[in-house]
Image (cartoon, rainbow, N blue to C red):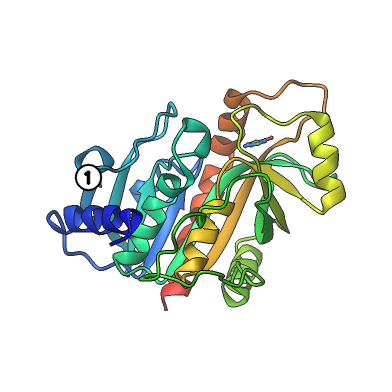
Amino acid sequence: MNQAYEKLTKCVASIRERTDFKPELALILGSGLGDYAQEIDVRATVDYKDIEGFPQSTVAGHKGRFIFGYVKEVPVVIMQGRVHYYEGYSMTDVVLPTRVMGMLGAKILILTNAAGGVNENYHPGDFMLLKDHISTFVPSPLIGANLDEIGTRFPDMSHVYDEELRGIVRNTAKELDISLQEGVYVQFTGPAYETPGEIRMCRTLGGDAVGMSTACEAMAARHMGLRICGISCITNLAAGMSDVPLNHKEVQEVADRVAVQFKQLVTEIIGKMGA
Ligand code: HPA
Protein backbone atom coordinates (compact mmCIF):
# COMPACT_ATOMS: atom_id res chain seq x y z
CA MET A 1 0.00 0.00 0.00
CA ASN A 2 1.12 3.58 -0.70
CA GLN A 3 2.88 4.96 2.41
CA ALA A 4 0.80 8.14 2.61
CA TYR A 5 -2.41 6.13 2.27
CA GLU A 6 -1.27 3.70 4.95
CA LYS A 7 -0.63 6.60 7.32
CA LEU A 8 -4.09 7.98 6.56
CA THR A 9 -5.82 4.67 7.28
CA LYS A 10 -3.91 4.36 10.57
CA CYS A 11 -5.00 7.86 11.63
CA VAL A 12 -8.61 7.08 10.71
CA ALA A 13 -8.45 3.80 12.67
CA SER A 14 -6.99 5.60 15.66
CA ILE A 15 -9.88 8.09 15.61
CA ARG A 16 -12.39 5.29 15.14
CA GLU A 17 -11.12 3.69 18.36
CA ARG A 18 -12.34 6.83 20.13
CA THR A 19 -15.56 7.69 18.32
CA ASP A 20 -17.87 6.24 15.68
CA PHE A 21 -19.39 9.67 14.92
CA LYS A 22 -20.13 10.09 11.19
CA PRO A 23 -19.72 13.69 10.02
CA GLU A 24 -21.40 15.00 6.87
CA LEU A 25 -19.57 18.28 6.86
CA ALA A 26 -16.02 19.27 7.83
CA LEU A 27 -14.90 22.69 9.00
CA ILE A 28 -11.37 23.99 9.40
CA LEU A 29 -11.10 26.91 11.79
CA GLY A 30 -8.71 29.71 10.94
CA SER A 31 -7.61 32.60 13.13
CA GLY A 32 -10.53 34.29 14.82
CA LEU A 33 -12.74 31.24 14.74
CA GLY A 34 -10.58 29.26 17.14
CA ASP A 35 -13.20 29.22 19.91
CA TYR A 36 -16.07 28.29 17.59
CA ALA A 37 -16.34 25.14 19.68
CA GLN A 38 -18.88 26.98 21.82
CA GLU A 39 -21.43 26.85 18.98
CA ILE A 40 -21.39 23.05 18.80
CA ASP A 41 -23.41 20.36 20.49
CA VAL A 42 -20.22 18.39 21.18
CA ARG A 43 -20.36 14.58 21.11
CA ALA A 44 -16.65 13.76 21.10
CA THR A 45 -13.24 15.38 20.90
CA VAL A 46 -9.98 13.79 19.80
CA ASP A 47 -6.67 15.55 20.48
CA TYR A 48 -4.19 15.45 17.60
CA LYS A 49 -1.50 14.33 20.04
CA ASP A 50 -3.44 11.14 20.69
CA ILE A 51 -3.45 10.20 17.00
CA GLU A 52 -0.29 8.35 16.07
CA GLY A 53 1.71 10.07 13.34
CA PHE A 54 -0.61 13.08 13.23
CA PRO A 55 1.07 16.47 12.59
CA GLN A 56 0.97 18.81 15.60
CA SER A 57 0.43 22.56 15.27
CA THR A 58 3.29 24.66 16.63
CA VAL A 59 1.59 28.07 16.27
CA ALA A 60 0.79 29.87 19.51
CA GLY A 61 -2.95 30.13 20.09
CA HIS A 62 -3.79 27.21 17.79
CA LYS A 63 -5.35 24.33 19.66
CA GLY A 64 -4.97 20.90 18.20
CA ARG A 65 -8.04 18.71 18.20
CA PHE A 66 -10.98 17.38 16.24
CA ILE A 67 -14.40 18.20 17.61
CA PHE A 68 -17.31 15.98 16.59
CA GLY A 69 -20.86 17.14 17.12
CA TYR A 70 -23.89 18.92 15.72
CA VAL A 71 -24.25 22.46 14.42
CA LYS A 72 -27.91 23.19 13.64
CA GLU A 73 -28.47 19.41 13.67
CA VAL A 74 -25.86 18.85 10.96
CA PRO A 75 -23.25 16.24 11.97
CA VAL A 76 -19.87 17.97 11.68
CA VAL A 77 -16.20 17.39 12.33
CA ILE A 78 -14.26 20.51 13.16
CA MET A 79 -10.52 21.02 13.10
CA GLN A 80 -9.59 23.34 15.90
CA GLY A 81 -6.04 24.18 14.84
CA ARG A 82 -4.44 23.37 11.51
CA VAL A 83 -0.85 22.79 10.49
CA HIS A 84 0.92 25.02 8.00
CA TYR A 85 3.65 24.28 5.49
CA TYR A 86 5.91 26.88 7.17
CA GLU A 87 5.95 24.78 10.33
CA GLY A 88 8.21 22.38 8.50
CA TYR A 89 5.79 19.60 7.60
CA SER A 90 5.68 18.10 4.13
CA MET A 91 2.65 19.10 2.06
CA THR A 92 1.47 15.50 2.37
CA ASP A 93 1.37 15.92 6.15
CA VAL A 94 -0.15 19.40 5.94
CA VAL A 95 -3.19 18.01 4.10
CA LEU A 96 -3.40 14.76 6.06
CA PRO A 97 -6.02 16.10 8.51
CA THR A 98 -8.18 17.29 5.60
CA ARG A 99 -8.03 13.88 3.97
CA VAL A 100 -8.78 12.17 7.27
CA MET A 101 -11.99 14.20 7.60
CA GLY A 102 -13.00 13.13 4.10
CA MET A 103 -12.30 9.50 4.97
CA LEU A 104 -14.41 9.84 8.13
CA GLY A 105 -17.37 10.60 5.87
CA ALA A 106 -17.49 14.37 5.32
CA LYS A 107 -18.81 15.34 1.88
CA ILE A 108 -18.54 19.12 2.26
CA LEU A 109 -15.54 21.08 3.51
CA ILE A 110 -15.71 24.65 4.78
CA LEU A 111 -12.28 26.29 4.92
CA THR A 112 -11.72 29.47 6.89
CA ASN A 113 -8.62 31.60 7.30
CA ALA A 114 -7.17 35.01 8.04
CA ALA A 115 -5.76 36.74 4.98
CA GLY A 116 -4.19 39.98 3.87
CA GLY A 117 -6.21 42.12 1.47
CA VAL A 118 -4.52 42.66 -1.90
CA ASN A 119 -7.54 44.13 -3.69
CA GLU A 120 -7.54 47.89 -3.11
CA ASN A 121 -11.27 47.89 -2.37
CA TYR A 122 -10.90 45.53 0.60
CA HIS A 123 -10.77 46.70 4.21
CA PRO A 124 -9.60 44.98 7.40
CA GLY A 125 -12.60 43.21 8.89
CA ASP A 126 -14.14 42.35 5.50
CA PHE A 127 -15.00 38.77 4.63
CA MET A 128 -14.05 37.29 1.28
CA LEU A 129 -15.72 34.29 -0.26
CA LEU A 130 -13.18 32.35 -2.32
CA LYS A 131 -14.13 32.00 -5.96
CA ASP A 132 -10.76 30.53 -6.92
CA HIS A 133 -7.18 30.28 -5.73
CA ILE A 134 -3.60 30.47 -6.99
CA SER A 135 -1.43 27.78 -5.38
CA THR A 136 1.50 28.08 -7.78
CA PHE A 137 3.84 29.44 -5.08
CA VAL A 138 3.60 26.38 -2.82
CA PRO A 139 4.31 22.74 -3.67
CA SER A 140 1.27 20.73 -4.70
CA PRO A 141 -0.02 18.40 -1.97
CA LEU A 142 -0.72 15.89 -4.77
CA ILE A 143 2.97 15.41 -5.66
CA GLY A 144 4.17 11.85 -5.10
CA ALA A 145 2.59 8.51 -5.90
CA ASN A 146 -1.12 9.09 -6.48
CA LEU A 147 -3.51 7.90 -3.79
CA ASP A 148 -5.63 5.92 -6.24
CA GLU A 149 -7.94 4.85 -3.40
CA ILE A 150 -9.19 8.41 -2.95
CA GLY A 151 -8.70 10.26 -6.23
CA THR A 152 -7.39 10.39 -9.76
CA ARG A 153 -3.81 11.26 -10.83
CA PHE A 154 -4.72 14.41 -12.79
CA PRO A 155 -7.74 15.95 -11.07
CA ASP A 156 -9.63 18.82 -12.65
CA MET A 157 -9.30 22.09 -10.70
CA SER A 158 -11.55 24.33 -12.81
CA HIS A 159 -14.27 24.44 -10.15
CA VAL A 160 -12.56 24.05 -6.77
CA TYR A 161 -15.06 26.21 -4.89
CA ASP A 162 -18.58 24.85 -5.31
CA GLU A 163 -20.99 27.24 -7.03
CA GLU A 164 -24.06 26.11 -5.08
CA LEU A 165 -22.28 26.46 -1.72
CA ARG A 166 -21.08 29.91 -2.75
CA GLY A 167 -24.67 30.87 -3.45
CA ILE A 168 -25.63 29.79 0.07
CA VAL A 169 -22.86 31.95 1.57
CA ARG A 170 -23.84 34.97 -0.57
CA ASN A 171 -27.52 34.72 0.39
CA THR A 172 -26.79 34.11 4.07
CA ALA A 173 -24.41 37.07 4.28
CA LYS A 174 -27.13 39.24 2.74
CA GLU A 175 -29.73 37.99 5.25
CA LEU A 176 -27.36 38.69 8.15
CA ASP A 177 -26.37 42.08 6.72
CA ILE A 178 -22.73 41.02 6.57
CA SER A 179 -20.80 42.56 3.71
CA LEU A 180 -19.04 39.95 1.65
CA GLN A 181 -16.36 40.33 -1.01
CA GLU A 182 -15.68 37.60 -3.50
CA GLY A 183 -12.21 36.95 -4.84
CA VAL A 184 -9.14 34.90 -5.60
CA TYR A 185 -6.94 33.67 -2.74
CA VAL A 186 -3.20 33.35 -3.26
CA GLN A 187 -1.23 31.00 -1.04
CA PHE A 188 2.39 31.68 -0.16
CA THR A 189 4.54 29.53 2.10
CA GLY A 190 5.14 32.15 4.81
CA PRO A 191 6.11 32.40 7.58
CA ALA A 192 7.35 35.88 6.63
CA TYR A 193 4.68 38.22 5.40
CA GLU A 194 5.10 39.14 1.76
CA THR A 195 7.13 42.03 0.35
CA PRO A 196 5.38 44.96 -1.36
CA GLY A 197 6.80 43.65 -4.66
CA GLU A 198 5.21 40.25 -4.10
CA ILE A 199 1.89 41.89 -3.35
CA ARG A 200 2.07 43.94 -6.56
CA MET A 201 2.80 40.68 -8.39
CA CYS A 202 -0.25 39.08 -6.76
CA ARG A 203 -2.47 41.92 -7.91
CA THR A 204 -1.09 41.70 -11.45
CA LEU A 205 -1.86 37.97 -11.43
CA GLY A 206 -5.45 38.58 -10.40
CA GLY A 207 -5.14 37.80 -6.68
CA ASP A 208 -7.43 39.53 -4.17
CA ALA A 209 -6.11 38.17 -0.87
CA VAL A 210 -2.99 36.39 0.41
CA GLY A 211 -2.44 33.81 3.09
CA MET A 212 -0.39 30.84 4.20
CA SER A 213 -2.94 28.01 4.15
CA THR A 214 -6.16 26.84 2.50
CA ALA A 215 -5.32 26.42 -1.21
CA CYS A 216 -3.36 23.24 -0.51
CA GLU A 217 -6.17 21.86 1.67
CA ALA A 218 -8.71 22.74 -1.01
CA MET A 219 -6.66 20.87 -3.63
CA ALA A 220 -6.41 17.75 -1.48
CA ALA A 221 -10.12 17.87 -0.73
CA ARG A 222 -11.05 18.44 -4.37
CA HIS A 223 -8.81 15.52 -5.36
CA MET A 224 -10.99 13.27 -3.22
CA GLY A 225 -14.22 14.75 -4.53
CA LEU A 226 -15.35 16.91 -1.62
CA ARG A 227 -17.47 19.98 -2.26
CA ILE A 228 -15.59 23.01 -0.99
CA CYS A 229 -16.42 26.42 0.38
CA GLY A 230 -13.74 28.90 1.49
CA ILE A 231 -14.11 32.11 3.47
CA SER A 232 -11.31 34.51 4.40
CA CYS A 233 -11.36 37.10 7.11
CA ILE A 234 -9.37 40.03 5.72
CA THR A 235 -7.36 41.03 8.78
CA ASN A 236 -5.03 43.60 7.24
CA LEU A 237 -4.02 45.39 4.09
CA ALA A 238 -1.24 43.37 2.50
CA ALA A 239 2.39 44.52 2.57
CA GLY A 240 3.12 47.94 1.08
CA MET A 241 -0.53 49.04 1.11
CA SER A 242 -0.36 50.89 4.42
CA ASP A 243 2.37 52.50 6.53
CA VAL A 244 2.08 50.08 9.44
CA PRO A 245 4.35 47.03 9.51
CA LEU A 246 2.48 43.72 9.57
CA ASN A 247 2.38 41.64 12.69
CA HIS A 248 0.57 38.55 13.96
CA LYS A 249 -0.95 40.46 16.89
CA GLU A 250 -2.77 42.88 14.57
CA VAL A 251 -4.01 39.97 12.47
CA GLN A 252 -5.32 38.25 15.60
CA GLU A 253 -6.94 41.43 16.94
CA VAL A 254 -8.90 42.14 13.77
CA ALA A 255 -9.94 38.50 13.53
CA ASP A 256 -11.15 38.64 17.14
CA ARG A 257 -13.07 41.86 16.49
CA VAL A 258 -15.20 40.31 13.75
CA ALA A 259 -15.31 36.80 15.24
CA VAL A 260 -18.94 37.12 16.37
CA GLN A 261 -20.11 37.89 12.82
CA PHE A 262 -17.85 35.23 11.35
CA LYS A 263 -19.25 32.57 13.70
CA GLN A 264 -22.81 33.63 12.98
CA LEU A 265 -22.19 33.35 9.23
CA VAL A 266 -20.54 29.93 9.56
CA THR A 267 -23.30 28.55 11.79
CA GLU A 268 -26.05 29.68 9.41
CA ILE A 269 -24.35 28.34 6.28
CA ILE A 270 -23.74 24.97 7.94
CA GLY A 271 -27.47 24.75 8.70
CA LYS A 272 -28.30 25.40 5.04
CA MET A 273 -25.56 23.23 3.55
CA GLY A 274 -26.60 20.27 5.66
CA ALA A 275 -30.29 20.65 4.82
N1 HPA B 1 -0.13 37.74 4.35
C1 HPA B 1 -0.13 36.39 4.52
N2 HPA B 1 -0.87 35.78 5.41
C2 HPA B 1 -1.71 36.52 6.16
C3 HPA B 1 -1.77 37.91 6.04
C4 HPA B 1 -0.94 38.56 5.08
O1 HPA B 1 -0.93 39.79 4.91
N3 HPA B 1 -2.70 38.35 6.94
C5 HPA B 1 -3.19 37.24 7.56
N4 HPA B 1 -2.58 36.14 7.10
Q: Toward the viewer: 15 or 62?
A: 15
Q: Count the numbered circles shown.
A: 1
Whether residue 241 can be seen here: no
Q: Taking the image as drawn, is residue 5 in sight?
A: yes
Give the residue type that dot 1 points to: Ile
Q: Is residue 58 above or below residue 144?
A: above
* Residue 139 image position (x, y, % from top left): 58, 47
**Is residue 31 positioned above or below 239 on the image?**
below
Q: What x and y, as percent, mark residue 162?
A: 59, 72
Provide the residue designation for mark 1. 51
Residue 89 x %, y %: 44, 37
- Asked if residue 112 lies left or right of residue 82, the reply is right
Residue sitting at x 44%, y 63%: 146
Left/right of residue 73 with respect to residue 209 in the rendered view: left
Q: Residue at x 60, y 72 (%)?
A: 156
Location of ligand 1 given as a quarter of the image? top right
Label 1 CA crowd tier, 10 Å (few <14, some 14–19, many 20+) = some
Task: List x then y, in percent, for residue 221.
Answer: 47, 63
Which quarter of the figure has residue 138? top right
